């Protein structure tokens, strides 16, 4: 089995701003997006299996990326994961590298953001509700919880 540790770095948890919920971690963002898509780790891995990608390696990579304190070192890693899980690589990178006060609002229920909203029906998308912690209109209705 290939060692995926070269694709990852450890990240120090970022402190929350006073009066604000703890910041979203890159690992939590990935986990929320995968779960919102209704996928298990195995199902997400299955979507990425190919001649070049072994199922066990992909499954191990996803589990590592969803481990608190772990961040993908390469943009290509998250771009590849986005082939299986609806997520925004730019939002992931912001969470991983930018100061907390520059993080976009991200729903604490499903991980969606203004850049990657939930689709509700054919013509509607969710929207973020004001307040802390951030939550979208779809999660407010309890559809993901």
Image (cartoon, rainbow, N blue to C red):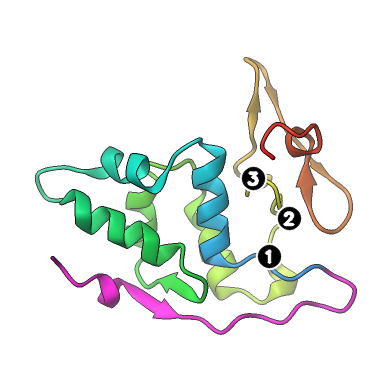
In front: mark 3 or mark 2? 3
Give the quarter of the figure containing the N terminus: bottom left
95 sits to left or right of 4: right
* Mark 3 vs 2, N-terminal side: 2
Secondary structure, mark 2, is loop
Q: On residue 103, which mark appears?
A: 1
The answer for how far apart the CA atoms under marks 1 and 3 are is 16 Å
User: Would you say the residues marked 3 and 2 are in contact, meaning their CB atoms lie under 8 Å apart?
Assistant: no
Where is residue 20? Give x, y as percent: 84, 70
Total marks placed: 3
The answer for how far apart the CA atoms under marks 3 and 2 are is 12 Å
Q: Which residues are magenta?
A: 1-20
Location of residue 65 (image quadrant): bottom left
Where is residue 101? Give x, y as percent: 75, 72
Position of residue 102 relative to residue 40, above or below, is: below
76 sits to left or right of 109: left
Q: On residue 110, which mark appears?
A: 3
Residue at the spot x=11%, y=50% of the render? 52
Q: Residues within 10 Å of mark 3 (few under 14, many from 20)?
A: many
Q: Residues within 10 Å of mark 1 (few under 14, many from 20)?
A: some
Secondary structure, mark 1, is loop
């Amino acid at each position: 089995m290939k060692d995926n540790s070269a694709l990852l770095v450890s990240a120090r948890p970022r402190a929350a701003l006073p009066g604000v919920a703890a910041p979203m971690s890159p690992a939590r963002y990935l986990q929320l997006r995968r779960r919102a898509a209704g996928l298990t780790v195995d199902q997400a891995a299955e979507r990425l299996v190919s001649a070049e990608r072994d199922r066990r390696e992909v499954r191990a990579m996803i589990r590592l990326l969803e481990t608190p304190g772990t961040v993908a070192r390469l943009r290509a890693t998250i771009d590849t994961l986005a082939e299986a899980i609806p997520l925004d690589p730019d939002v992931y990178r912001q969470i991983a590298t930018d100061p907390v006060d520059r993080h976009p609002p991200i729903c604490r229920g499903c991980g969606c953001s203004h850049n990657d909203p939930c689709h509700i029906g054919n013509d509607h998308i969710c929207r973020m509700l004001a307040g802390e912690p951030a939550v979208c209109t779809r999660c407010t209705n309890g559809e993901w919880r």
